[in-house]
Amino acid sequence: MISYISICIKINEMTYFVSVINTVDTSHEDMIHDAQMDYYGTRLATCSSDRSVKIFDVKNGGQILVADLRGHEGPVWQVAWAHPMYGNILASCSYDRKVIIWKEENGTWDKMYEYTGHDSSVNSVCWGPYDFGLFLACGSSDGAISVLTCSGDGHWDIKKINNAHTIGCNAVSWAPAVVPGSLIEQPTGQKPNYIKRFVSGGCDNLVKLWKEEDGQWKEDQKLEAHSDWVRDVGWAPSIGLPTSTIASCSRDGRVFIWTCDDPAGNTWTAKLLHKFNDAVWHVSWSITGKILAVSGGDNKVTLWKESVDGQWACISDVNKGQGAVTSITDSQQNEQ
Amino acid sequence: MEKMTRVSGTVSGCTMFCHLDAPANAISVCRDATQVVVAGRNIFKIYGLEEDGFVERLNLRVGRKPSLNFSCADVMWHQMEENLLATAATNGAVVTWNLARPCRNKQEQLFTEHKRTVNKVCFHPTEVNMLLSGSQDGFMKCFDLRKKESVSTFSGQSESVRDVQFSIKDYFTFAASFENGNVQLWDIRRPDRYERMFTAHTGPVFCCDWHPEDRGWLATGGRDKMVKVWDMSTNRVKEIYCVQTIASVARVKWRPERRYHLATCSMMVDHNIYVWDVRRPFIPFATFEEHKDVTTGIVWRHQHDPYFLLSGSKDSTLYQHMFKDASRPVDRANPEGLCFGLFGDLAFAAKESLMSAPQSVGDVGRKTYPGGDRRYPIFFFKKPDVTEQFAQVSSALSVFESEAGSSVGMDWFINTAQSYLLSGKPFAELCEHNAQVAKRLNRPQESTTWTMLRIMFSEPANPSLSSNHNLNKSGNLPLVNSFSMKEMSAALNERNKENRQDNLHSLETNLNNNDENEETEGSEGQAEYLFGDAELDDDDLYSMEHDNQAEEPEYLLPQEAFPLRHEIMDHPSAPEPVQEKPESPHVSGSEAESTCLTPMESFSLISVSQLLFSPHLPPKFFCPIVKEMLCYYAEQGDVQMAVSVLIVLGDRIRKEIDELTQEHWYMSYIDLLQRFELWNVSNEVIKLSTCGAIMCLNQTSTTLHINCSNCKRPMSNKGWICDRCHHCASVCAVCHHVVKGLFVWCQGCSHGGHLEHVMEWLKQSKHCPAGCGHLCEYT
């Protein structure tokens, strides 16, 4: 029951060449649910069913365990790094209904805050754009989404959106700080309205957009396309982009790309990226927001890029690359 | 152990519930799984289990004023005698009930030997008349139902007894759990002392349950939120599994027919019922989330049927849970983690099995083993069991690195950021340099873009030069301009050496001339060279140059040329007199320059140029295209290109793109640079940016921390006097006067003084002038 990191496998886009470079033990005793690189790409945080959060230093291709954070009483589903301008801060959410915010001070990680306001498993955490302060959104199986804002003195202000997704919320992702559509082709002199917005996906098969109005969170849009639980949503970074782009993936195997050219953010169009044969668990945007990584139930990662004509094409296809390991799909959960 | 077929079909039903009149404390089923008894402080009823619902069969609370004997903490239905029930009353009584009694009151026997609440009653699994009780008073009593009194009393010698359980396999053994965390094993024949005792939990052990098949296994649950499985078969009691739940464990029940499964419920906070696979202690195998208040009693409906679980709760409901309706946290759990790293690398964690081939596991642990029986002996059970996939799950975490040069990676970004020149050289040279950089990094599109930009915006040599020359001749050229001219010519040299393929002999000579001229420094020489060069060049290439030259004096006014020159000096891009690239022979330097020298102001020039022919288009003409191009790059996520071009082009394009867009690009690029820890580049970009909002970035957030040179403690106030030692903090250590103006100090010892004094001092001595003995360093 040992989980391994294999720091391995170079992708060569041209040849799809795959090779294993190194394998390192994460020493997680159960399934790893999330792995997140920090802002500078030098540290990797992993979280597992074994209740632990581990932080690895991955500078220069090394993998050194630098911290093992214990504090959750259930499987830890997701971790998220805050922007470094607030220090080294990591948030984790767990089946134990808690969100723990960890902070590194003088080389040691400690709990900075523990949020226990959810009635069920907390499935997703995501820090908002640093421009607006230190705040994060948490989506829970109790259907609610909480937005926690640090008021600076260690106090956290909590706003809860109840019943955001019936049955449960699986994923949250913040919009970039700037509303991109409002920048290009904007009549000069008019300041774009900086609204905090995020997207969430849930067990009601919906993708929902939320925005803050007068300090209150309101449902902005409801995007319907999926026919099963939405497992992950990702708002693309808007580096120079004129449009807002959101990727969503679902258990129904579909990945949709939602775009909105309208500065007001009212009209969203869905484009089916691909229909996979198995559930799709994750979508992740590259730092420039141009390449989308998708991971599905078949233990495969595919990379997608929008071509000039607006079609999304698979540019790379990454298997785990360890020949001995065959992919496990869904068989074992059907046991009664 | 393969009993699973024995019961299939005998029990059927669905998930259902009924409301009770009062909160339940405990439930128990009769042996044939058709009835359930619910007991609580104010309830004592028997319900029939029908296909589609509960049917109340009997209310055992009878009499006008029910005695406290009806207030039940626990209830147990005899597993052999179907009419026999026992309850533990909160007043300390142990009561047995006989449903076969003809009257309404079914109470059979009453034992009032315990002094405090009886927490638990337990019938012997095989001995009909034997009943065991455990009480808050710390005693356990064994009753023979044929007698009026207990036959033996066991003193735990410790705190309250929370649970007592007869071993299913060992006739004489029972286990008792205590509030102090201990578990004791007793032999009913030996009431004097326990057989063994061990500390199972920190804090009370609320429950224990013997494994229905493995005689040595005992599961215990405690307030410490743990469920532990103990192996009693060895000499030393050994903890073999430990499951940590999220709340204190009130009840634990092994699941029938599932060797590793047990159900738990909590006594506070958590209302759910969990079914765990003890080999996977972190995540419940299944949960039942129906109850709205604390679940107080759980029981598997039939001792050989794993699919039906009954539960009673403080929310006054009685539930039958179907296993197929349970929620499976594992299903909701994300088996994969995916993260796009900064450098285009992907971190990907995925569930993996240690098995070589997956197989469908419909029924955990009860399938024939592939390739014969490969079960491990008990003490090896922590080893992965090949058939049970739920139990052993791990993930492989891979980091995929993108190959350098692929569009996925970000190496190009870093390389480009570090290699691009944004200022400090003439415009064309910057373009050329950047084009080369892009080319080297295998980014032909960017390379071409730079080249095109150079062509579009570079100033052709002749007109400006001729005008300069003219000016020169008139003797008005200021010194500043002469410097810029020199720079230009130097650039020209290089370029000519590098790029010119036409090898005009005359040009060579010109170059040589130019070299000499450069050394001799002076505007005259420059002008001479440039003029000559331009002339040759033009003659070679275009006849129209003459038109240009002819027209030049008419519209190029000296007073315009001056400020322009000056401005170009200040900005990163300086005009480049001549450029010739093999691939763009049709745009000669002269045309481009003629257009570019006067970007916005001289409309006359523009109109004239436009009249000539297309390569003569003014920069203004290109601006929309360039703007579009920048937007394209930005859309492609390449803000680097957008910003670099923006900076290099400077005023040529700046006004074309609205401020906010520029600001956004700058912000995005600076953000990216900082993510890649390219602080120097980021700083340079901030410095070179023309957006007000960006430029102020560098003016914020610089804080200087100073120590008092006298007491060496940090200065907190802004004045001259240290508020701690009340001395003037900025006294020169050499001349002992207060320093005004430039003050230099050693960061090691906080001593310092006038810059010149300290410099002088440190020339002679390595030690601090204040005499503190510190070896100061001045760099």
Image: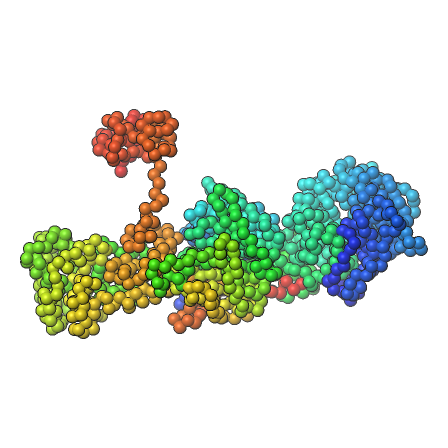
In the displayed structure image, the side of residue B415 where residue A326 appears, left or right? right
Q: Residue at x 88, y 51 (%)?
A: B62
Residue B741: give x, y in percent of width and height: 25, 35
Foreground of the two, B597 or B642: B597
**Quadrant in the picture for residue B255:** bottom right
Foreground of the two, B241 or A215: A215
Is B2 located above or below residue B587 in the figure?
above
In the displayed structure image, the side of residue B324 where residue B680 appears, left or right? left
Q: Residue at x 33, y 26 (%)?
A: B727
Is A42 located above or below residue A246 in the figure?
above
**Quadrant in the picture for residue B101:** bottom right
In the displayed structure image, the side of residue A190 where residue B398 appears, left or right? right
Residue A231: give x, y in percent of width and height: 55, 62
Residue B468: give x, y in percent of width and height: 11, 60
Q: Quadrant of the C terminus of chain B?
A: top left
Foreground of the two, B404 or B299: B299
Q: Residue at x 64, y 49 (%)?
A: B246
**Quadrant in the picture for residue A252:** bottom right
